[in-house]
Amino acid sequence: MTKKELRYVYKERRLELGVEQIEMMQEMLLLRFRQLNLPVLKYVHSYLAIDRHKEIDTRPILEFLKFRHPEMKLVIPKSDFIRNSFVNYLYGPDTVLEKNQFGILEPAGGEMVAPELIDLVLVPLLAFDERGYRVGYGKGFYDHFLAGCRKDVCKVGLSFFEAVDRIDDTDDFDISLTFCVTPHRVYDF
């Protein structure tokens, strides 16, 4: 299937999930995530879940990572919709969040963090394939961002659903994941 086809199918599949089903899947996903053998983490980049899109809530994963890596700093993006890119800011208890034009919470400002400092990225996605390529919302924000990160950055996708065999229209700009975690399995690419 193509990215466009997968985007449509998996948006619909996610919207069909009920609250209890999502809660159970999130708990199972966290158990799988804990199985990852991760290096020492200084900077972790994460998206803030968009509830209306039924995205995976990263907060339990981040709490686990912070417990395992007490010195870890959390980084979140602020989108630039003209360039289809984002700037990364440290995120803490004092960070002021504001909704952007699409209703997505983002930092109002703060201390910027260079992409090359980031050790791990929690990557949002709608679908992914057996090779580690993903389908996002189609604007290329994460591919652009990941291209600016270190080559050894750990890229972890989070998905309620298992991998498809192959995304038919990947290209040279697509960057594969290091791992993808689902409620039933950890994929290692």
Image (cartoon, grey):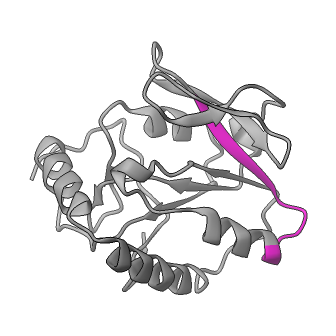
Residue 161 point in image, percent of width and height: 28, 71
Residue drawn where x is 27% and y is 74% of the image:
162
- Drawn side of residue 129 relative to residue 114, left or right: left
**Quarter of the view holding residue 183:** bottom left
Towards the viewer: 182 or 97: 97
- Drawn side of residue 159 relative to residue 38, left or right: left
In the image, farthest residue toward the right: 71
Residue 154 point in image, percent of width and height: 60, 60
Vertical arrangement, residue 121 with respect to residue 110, above or below: below
Vertical arrangement, residue 75 with respect to residue 70, above or below: above
Vertical arrangement, residue 14 with respect to residue 21, above or below: above
Q: Is residue 157 magenta?
A: no
**Quarter of the view holding residue 167:** bottom left
Mark yes or no: residue 61 visible.
yes
Vertical arrangement, residue 169 with respect to residue 21, above or below: above
Residue drawn where x is 66% and y is 42% of the image:
76
| Stretch in magenta | 67-78
Residue drawn where x is 38% and y is 33% of the image:
140
Mark yes or no: residue 168 visible.
no
Q: Is residue 68 magenta?
A: yes
In the image, farthest residue toward the front: 19
Residue 158 point in image, percent of width and height: 44, 65
Residue drawn where x is 83% and y is 49% of the image:
93
Residue 182 point in image, percent of width and height: 39, 76
